[in-house]
Image (cartoon, coloured by chain):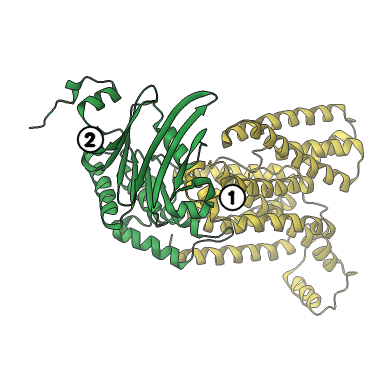
Amino acid sequence: MTFKVGNGYFYYKDVPILKNINFQISKGELLTILGPNGVGKTTLVKCMLGFLEWSQGDTLIDEYPIKNYARNQLWKKIGYVPQMKSLPFSYTAESLVLMGRNPYINFFSKPKKEDYDHVDRIFEAFNLEHLKKKQINKLSGGEIQMLLIARALVAEPELLILDEPELNLDLANQARIFDVLVELVASKGIGCIVNTHHPINALRYGHKSLLLMKDFQYMYGRTRDILNKKNLSKTFELSQEWFNFKIS
Amino acid sequence: MKDKNLKGYYIMLSLLLLGLVIVSLTIGKYEISKHDLWRILKNAWSNELSMDEMPAFVIFSVRLPRIFMAVLIGSGLAAAGAGMQAVFKNPLVSDRMLGVSAGASFGVALGILIYNNIVFIQLMAFIWGIAAVLFTYIIGKSSKSSSVIVLVLAGLIVSAVFTSLLSLVQYSAEVDTELPSMIYWLMGSLSGVELQDVKIVFLPIVLSVGLLFMIRWKLNMLSLSDEEAEALGLHVKLYRILVIISSTVISATAVSMCGMIGWVGLITPHIGRMLVGTDHEKLMPVSIMIGGIYLLFIDNLCRLLYSAELPLSVLTALIGAPIFGVLLKKTGGNWI
């Protein structure tokens, strides 16, 4: 599949937030979205998923506007991993991941054996079987993030969209998350869009990047072409020297 | 939670409910021995029952309707509570969140003031309970964001208005006759429930509970943030409105039949969570059973504790709150 944002504008009560956004991602690509706080990254994610309506332009999946897809069809194609936050009810890890099967479950139905099998397989693949019956509020941030990814994957999506998956995670856990994503992209050909605050992760793991800057400017292209000191310093309003570091 | 345990809980709670129903038939001011009960039930089975016999009359015309009503309303309030807690993503919410019982109470008082007839009062309670939630929904809806916080605030506003209106009606009521009757009605009681009442209540409660039961697994997603649920392919608004409608029908029916009954909708889902965890697929059936058991148990106490009947709302809270306190203290609330 191809996932494309064409000519995307978003105004919040006549105040422009995003202007003329264009990008595209296909199977087997990992796109990172970077930018300073308040520049509209979260708005961009919401718009491209249809949570907010573009004022102009559209999100297109295989050339059809996202609105044309029925709810179930759409969320079988796209898996969304929200920012991790505490939940009011502490479900077991299994219940949480099982929710990912919802697009396959009818209006008055509940999960069937087949759905449980999918969940079993993903726990196995992620090596998380020991967590299955545990309550999520007893788990670590890294474990919960893995479960959220697992939940998005049990719907067998073609595209995965993650909103700051490294939030509050230490380096090792960040690396684990991205290793999983890179593996999914490489072996299963899933497309992946990651909203991130860490240029290092973008550089290390991304194929394409989108740099959102102030005053509605942005850059989009191959990660190795655009993630350089000049662009990063412009984006994050830091001096170029700030990025001059080497770890011995 | 293993599924083996789950079956065990279902069986245990069903037996408990059945046992309690049988016990409830025998206890009371008019004593009926187990032997009599058995004989009468046997006669009833073989159609040889004569209602002229006092024990048979007490069992079938007085106690059975009352027991049915207690179980129906208790189960209903529990299901409504569990549903509303999911919709509002908050375990402290009860079925009254959107102003239904404030509206229905006002309806009761207004009914007594206008035309003191039981059916009319019940109808007024039901209508005003629904109207209150409708107001809440309209106010909450007019804001652009459809977040549940706005609904909660709208519920507070509507509740406040109807509570004031209730006071106003009570203030203008006749002190010797109307006012006490308003107050007693709202304190709640199941005494005087007849088979006719059960027939009226049966359909709205069973349909609403049935709906909540059918969508129980979907409540899991509904309890997540709206966007998260949307991204799992859930039609959030549709499920939310279904839960709100069924809870409102249940609560309005409850107030119209037996006054304001607090605590059932709030604590029974918590007791359910302690047993089977948070997953609504298991929680909903367990809560429904616990709700029925709880209200029937409390109603028995209302009948037995004192020479006169005690108000239902007094005991649901007076017993429920301390039980909840002990459980909270013991477990530290770790079931949530």
User: What colour is chain A?
Assistant: green
Q: Is residue A126 above or below residue B252?
A: below
Instruction: Give the image quarter of residue A242.
Output: top left
Residue A39 vs residue A21, the one in the foreground: A21
Residue B82 vs residue A189, the one in the foreground: A189
CA gap, disc 2 to disc 1? 60 Å
Left or right of residue B208: residue A171 = left
| Circle 2 residue | A225
Q: Which mark is residue A22?
A: none
Instruction: Give the image quarter of residue A240.
Output: top left
| Circle 1 residue | B268
Dot 1, how many residues are within 10 Å of its Cα: few (below 14), some (14-19), or many (20+)?
Answer: many
Q: Is residue A95 above or below residue B56?
A: above
Please provide percent x and percent y for residue B65: 79, 60
Please provide percent x and percent y for residue A63: 45, 48
Residue at (51% x, 44% y) in the render: B326
Left or right of residue A153: residue B286 = right
